[in-house]
Image (tube, rainbow, N blue to C red):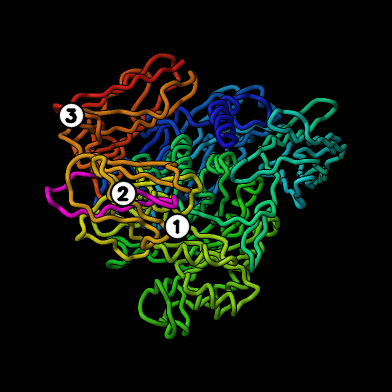
């Protein structure tokens, strides 16, 4: 019940958030996403040709031009066989006399990549990293009484520069921020709770106040901590003098009977820090924060609020199939709810910082987060062009900018996100020590080295000894900003890294796919804190965590299918997820739910006996929810459950009970002589039925069925309806084998953002209004414009009965 209350409050906040961002109070960020223009090519004369260029397309941000395609094998498998290139953005806006003597900033949450920004022809700067937020001051160049034009060049011409799909363009939110000369700067409030118990917590708030004038400023800085009913839980204020530049001050307060943040009850306080001068408020920063304690123990694992907690996690990337990386928050709300229901309590944000709102969602929905900075350091990794581990790889990537930008990028990652209670680890890198990609060591000639590129030690590759000094540099940069969380990295070549001392630099050490090393390394390095930072789906990989108290975590690769890191053409996305690109659940999802969820569940699926599960580390169980087979076939029926016993029924006749604990792999299974009808499984605890699940024989496709997640929206706000579309027979059963093409029409103040069926090899255009179904289903993203009225969404497919949804904008 508490979770439902928190989710209701969150969704209310999600609706109101854009209103708050539009508020024109001094110091408050204002969304700056609307009415941009985009040119999908370079401009030969650069900024000087901005006005004469005529090929501009009106868009709203966020925007990802790569997802517009088309898919082609002339691009790279690593990035989903989608194009890169160079693009230009511009936006004209009126100045305001209210900005006189103010400082006006533009803040980008992320631009991929090599962004360069101009205001009224004046160059502001370049940011190579496509995942790091940044801002520029516009004030010196603004026309307060007339038109202003901001221009952004994005250079993603090195399209094979990542091992996964990154998208291209201004793909995250942009904000305009207006500040007084005396103000609290970007990311200049730090909140922490160094001591936490059920009865009392110590709160520490550090604030930097900036004075941009040449005269000393006498100000009052006030800190309020408000509970979820907007009642003051703590308040302090100080009078200080700020000379030109910055001055730091610190507030310390004891909170009696604090409401603690955890994964089940993610309680959030509101932190308000304001600056007043001569009795008038001149700036305010408001953030949600949580009171919680975290610690890792070398022998006992992870503790949240002094409670031993296994991190049942998944790794995720940024994209959402048809939407590319320009993903509305509602999409992640749906995805995270699905993962939460599977028992997932932690996310590894691989392998880069993510969109700002995702951290807010994790705070509000109760996910523990590993935030990760880099996938490579000063030497490039292989980015496959013709298929994973096929042909000649590209070496383009972030390493080209690492030496100049790494410290700043990782510092900004931490500064931006350090007040989120969800974050429990900072990762300085993923698989930087991948054996021979690029680093090498003589020890690779001996022992067991999973994931190795090439054979043994490669003398022409950079030495693994280079890892340790760079790791020290990055750890120092992180701790200069935040010492309240451990620093980690995900290691792929533990054998090699052990030889050069790389793990010793880290507070906690992530092992990727090396469960077999847990016991030996725990003995050999008794002070090392070890956890699984990236893991496969196999049962033994979870057993290595579940049976060892000192292993605190498993992060599955991966939670959700993602574009890129693909095989040979025509495959253009990776199918390793528990849910597919449309967030439809796979059989593997239910198997994981049977291991991780406390709520009673049971799932039934079937397959031909001749088919067996692949034994690869990313292989998925093949028990599909379909009961349409050839007459007389012998079918294997698998049941994924966390119940003590299950009983299978075919057309009402019991085929027997099975104990979960006595079943092979804890998966009750039956060999069944197929006959059409209904297959029903019941789950029992202590002899009492607690859940059930069934599949039925489907007839011929008869009609479409549409199920929206939301149909009522607010005016003045864009909204998103995520509509699941199914083909059903005359009796309402889903036709799992249907692959008909569905066409969508949208009439009214809304538009179709995209159609996604979850296929990893479809090359249908994501810009089209029609798409084939996969497994008899499809997901449509329909965005409302915010104008009052109704949006009629119609789905049709040949001679099948159509389906319609009416969206209302009040």
Q: Is residue 386 left or right of residue 225?
A: left
Outermost residue on the left side: it is: 631
Q: Earlier in the sequence, mark 3 or mark 2?
A: 2
Q: Which residue is mark 3?
A: 702
Quadrant of res 434? bottom left
Q: Which residue is mark 1?
A: 556
Mark 1 and mark 3: span between their CA atoms? 39 Å
Mark 3 and mark 2: span between their CA atoms? 36 Å
Q: Residues within 10 Å of mark 3 (few under 14, many from 20)?
A: some
Q: Which residue is mark 2?
A: 82
Q: Earlier in the sequence, mark 2 or mark 1?
A: 2
> In the rendered structure, which segment of residues is drawn in magenta?
626-647
Q: Nearer the viewer, residue 131 or 536?
A: 536
Q: Position of residue 769 (x, y in %)?
A: 26, 31
Secondary element at tag 3: loop
Query: What residue is rendered at 80% in x and 36% in y?
Result: 234
């Amino acid at each position: 019940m508490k979770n439902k209350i928190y989710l209701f409050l969150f969704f209310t906040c999600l609706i109101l958030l854009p209103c708050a961002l539009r508020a024109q109070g001094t110091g408050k960020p204002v969304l700056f996403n609307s009415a941009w223009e985009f040119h999908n090519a370079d401009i030969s004369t650069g900024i000087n040709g901005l006005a004469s260029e005529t090929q501009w397309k009106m868009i709203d941000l966020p925007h990802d031009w790569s997802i517009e395609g088309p898919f082609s094998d002339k691009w790279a498998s690593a990035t989903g066989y989608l194009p890169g290139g160079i693009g230009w953005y511009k936006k004209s806006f009126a100045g305001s006399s209210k900005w006189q003597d103010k400082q006006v900033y533009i803040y980008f949450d992320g631009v991929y990549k090599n962004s360069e920004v101009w205001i009224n022809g004046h160059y502001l700067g370049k940011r190579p990293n496509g995942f790091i937020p940044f801002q520029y001051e516009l004030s010196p160049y603004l026309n307060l009484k007339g038109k202003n034009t901001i221009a952004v060049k994005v250079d993603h011409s090195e399209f094979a520069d990542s091992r996964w799909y990154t998208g291209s363009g201004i793909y995250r939110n942009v904000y305009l921020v207006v500040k007084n000369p005396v103000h609290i700067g970007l990311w200049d409030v730090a909140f922490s709770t160094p001591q936490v118990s059920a009865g009392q917590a110590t709160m520490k708030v550090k604030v930097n106040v900036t004075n941009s004038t040449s005269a000393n400023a006498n100000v009052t800085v006030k800190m309020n901590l408000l509970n979820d009913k907007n009642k003051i839980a703590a308040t302090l204020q100080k009078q200080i003098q700020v000379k030109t530049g910055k001055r730091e001050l610190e507030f310390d307060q004891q909170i009696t009977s604090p409401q603690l943040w955890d994964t089940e009850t993610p309680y959030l306080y509101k932190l308000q820090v304001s600056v007043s001068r001569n009795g008038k408020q001149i700036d305010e920063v408001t953030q949600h924060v949580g009171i919680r304690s975290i610690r890792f123990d070398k022998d006992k694992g992870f503790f949240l609020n002094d409670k031993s907690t296994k991190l049942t996690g998944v790794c995720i990337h940024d994209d959402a199939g048809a939407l590319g990386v320009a993903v509305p928050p509602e999409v992640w709300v749906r995805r995270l709810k699905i993962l939460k229901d599977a028992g997932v309590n932690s996310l590894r944000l691989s392998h880069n910082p993510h969109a700002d709102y995702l951290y807010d969602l994790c705070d509000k929905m109760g996910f523990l987060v590993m935030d990760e900075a880099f996938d490579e350091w000063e030497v490039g990794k292989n980015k496959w062009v013709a298929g994973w581990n096929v042909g000649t790889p590209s070496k383009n990537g972030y390493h080209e900018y690492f030496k100049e930008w790494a410290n700043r990028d990782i510092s900004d990652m931490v500064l931006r996100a350090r007040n989120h209670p969800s974050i429990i680890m900072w990762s300085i890198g993923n698989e930087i020590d991948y054996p021979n990609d690029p680093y090498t060591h003589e020890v690779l000639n001996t022992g067991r080295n999973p994931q190795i590129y090439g054979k043994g030690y490669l003398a022409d590759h950079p030495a693994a000894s280079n890892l340790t000094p760079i790791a020290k540099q990055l750890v120092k940069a992180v701790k200069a900003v935040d010492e309240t969380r451990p620093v980690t990295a995900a290691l792929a070549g533990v054998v090699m890294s052990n030889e050069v001392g790389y793990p010793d630099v880290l507070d906690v050490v992530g092992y990727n796919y090396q469960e077999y090393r847990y016991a030996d390394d725990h003995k050999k390095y008794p002070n090392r804190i070890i956890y699984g930072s990236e893991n496969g789906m196999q049962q033994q990989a979870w057993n290595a965590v579940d049976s060892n108290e000192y292993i605190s975590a498993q992060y599955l690769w991966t939670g959700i299918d993602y574009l890129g890191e693909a095989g040979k053409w025509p495959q253009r996305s990776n199918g390793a997820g528990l849910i597919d690109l449309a967030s439809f659940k796979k059989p593997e999802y239910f198997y994981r739910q049977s291991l991780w969820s406390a709520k009673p569940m049971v799932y039934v699926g079937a397959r031909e006996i001749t088919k067996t599960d692949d034994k690869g580390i990313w292989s998925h169980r093949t028990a599909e929810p379909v009961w349409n087979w050839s007459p007389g076939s012998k079918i294997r029926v698998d049941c994924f459950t966390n119940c003590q016993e299950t009983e299978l029924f075919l057309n009402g006749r019991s085929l027997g009970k099975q104990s979960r604990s006595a079943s092979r792999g804890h998966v009750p299974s039956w060999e069944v002589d197929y006959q059409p009808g209904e297959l029903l499984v019941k789950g029992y605890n202590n002899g009492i039925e607690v859940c059930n699940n069934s599949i039925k024989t489907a007839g011929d496709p008869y009609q479409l069925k549409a199920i929206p997640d939301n149909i009522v929206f607010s005016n003045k706000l864009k909204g998103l309806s995520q509509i699941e579309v199914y083909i059903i027979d005359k009796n309402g059963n889903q036709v799992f084998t249907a692959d008909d093409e569905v066409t969508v029409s949208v009439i009214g103040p809304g538009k179709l953002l995209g159609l996604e069926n979850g296929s990893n090899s479809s090359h249908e255009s994501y810009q089209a209004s029609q798409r084939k179904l996969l497994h008899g289903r499809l997901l449509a993203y329909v965005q409302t414009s915010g104008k009052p009225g109704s949006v009629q969404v119609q789905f049709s497919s040949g001679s099948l009965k159509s389906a319609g949804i009416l969206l209302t904008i009040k």
